[in-house]
Image (cartoon, helix red, strand yellow):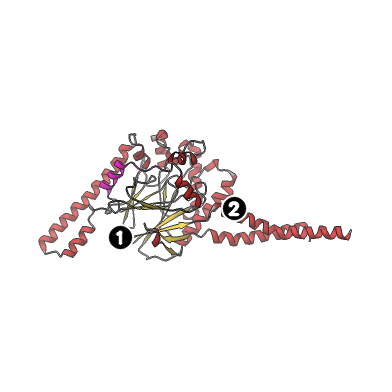
Amino acid sequence: MSMSTKIIISVTLFATVFDIYYHRITIPSCTIAFPNPIHALPVPADSDHNSQDFTAILVSDLLLSGSDSSYFDVFFRDYFLSQFFEKSFENLKPDMLLVLGDVSAKGFELTTKKWSSVVEQFQRMIGPYLHLPFHVTLGDRDIGECSKLKTSVVHRVASSFPELNHGGCGSFEMSNVSFISLNAMALLCGNNELLSGVETVIENESAYLRTIYEDVIDQTVKLNAASETSYESYQHRWRDNPASSQSGPVLLLHIPLQQMSNSYCSQESSFSTIWDSLPDNLKLLWRRDADSRPYNLLHTVPPNASEYIFQALKPRMIFSAHSHKFCDVIHPDGTREVTVPALSWTAKDDPGFIAATFSRNGSITVRRCSLPRESHVVVSCIAIFVLSALPAIITSLLQRLNIIYDG
């Protein structure tokens, strides 16, 4: 058997085995998530939902580098990430994509040209599903931490994505579900030139909610004047009252709100256990970005700003990110906040995302979806390559032994 034939056989074997492995690992594994993890239920990734339901895929921390990407990123990480997107969209059939910040690894440092390459990379990653509605909130990697926060950078980044104003906030409606996204960095950093714009967005939304509340009160008075209203129907209207907790829009932001109560956060690996046992000052030194500055994964929106949001917006539910891991918390007023895990292998070895289904009856079903570990994929690819090359190597060795023996 000639050497070229051996190479062809090995390459064919590698391509066949890799194709089977690739199609298997790129399908997400999803479970229904509850604040109490004991109740988590496995569900198939392609489970059907009512035709009137609205499903959104929520991802965060893509950490794209655009034209600064290494060959390993381009031909391995970015390739698999685009395949994860494709398979996830294919199986979950979402109506919308929500990206909760940190699209870029260091967008605030990039020139306009390099930032454009990040946006193009993001669009290539979504690929054939770019026609679906999508919304992006801004993260600290996109616009900078407090010491680097500049209005000009926020304007540039915000103008690259739909439904965002110059201050990085936005509001939109999808299938009768209202969403509002806030520039969490402006809230986190406190006294800055962007904060007043965020407060204006919150106040406008709060005024809109008060208007709805007043309309409901007027209708209730008219109904009561026309006929007696049963206690049961009164209770039903009170639960739907826009002035009550969880009656406002779904809130999207990169930095989690201040957590006043215990939350469930995933412990995906033994590394997570070691991480949680470290002192806070060591955690700050552990994760560093490209220029070796400390990168804080522990940020939360300050207590006063968090309380202001609860009082003004009365969010129906909150989706946040930044910590790179999945968390599920019920706040004191009963509002649920889900923190979306990082999707990028650059951020963590075991990435994931969230699929949220908004039903017509008002319920929200959250599915936590996991993707394979980068370390497992690397080891598997090496193993497949070695096993594919093994027959050719063994054949060559046997031929050499025969030549030596015959000689």
Q: Amino acid at mark 1?
A: Gly
Q: Amino acid at mark 2?
A: Val
In the rendered view of the protein, which quadrant contains the C terminus? Answer: bottom right
Give the CA separation, mark 2 to mark 1. Answer: 43 Å
In the rendered view of the protein, which quadrant contains the N terminus? Answer: bottom right
Closer to us: 323 or 183? 323
Vertical order, 238 against 257 (above or below): below
The residue labelled by disc 2 is 378
Residue for point 21% across, 50% down: 211
The spot of residue 85 in percent (x, y) is: 49, 55
Q: Is residue 28 left or right of residue 234?
A: right
Q: Secondary structure at mark 1?
A: loop
Q: Secondary structure at mark 2?
A: helix
Task: Say which mark, if any, is on residue 94.
Answer: none
Residue span colored magenta:
298-313
Closer to us: 177 or 330? 330
Closer to us: 257 or 136? 257
Task: Say which mark, if any, is on residue 362.
Answer: 1
- Local crowd size for mark 2, using a 10 Å CA cut-off: few (<14), some (14–19), many (≥20): few
- Local crowd size for mark 1, using a 10 Å CA cut-off: few (<14), some (14–19), many (≥20): few
The spot of residue 142 in percent (x, y) is: 44, 41
Q: Residue furthest left?
A: 225
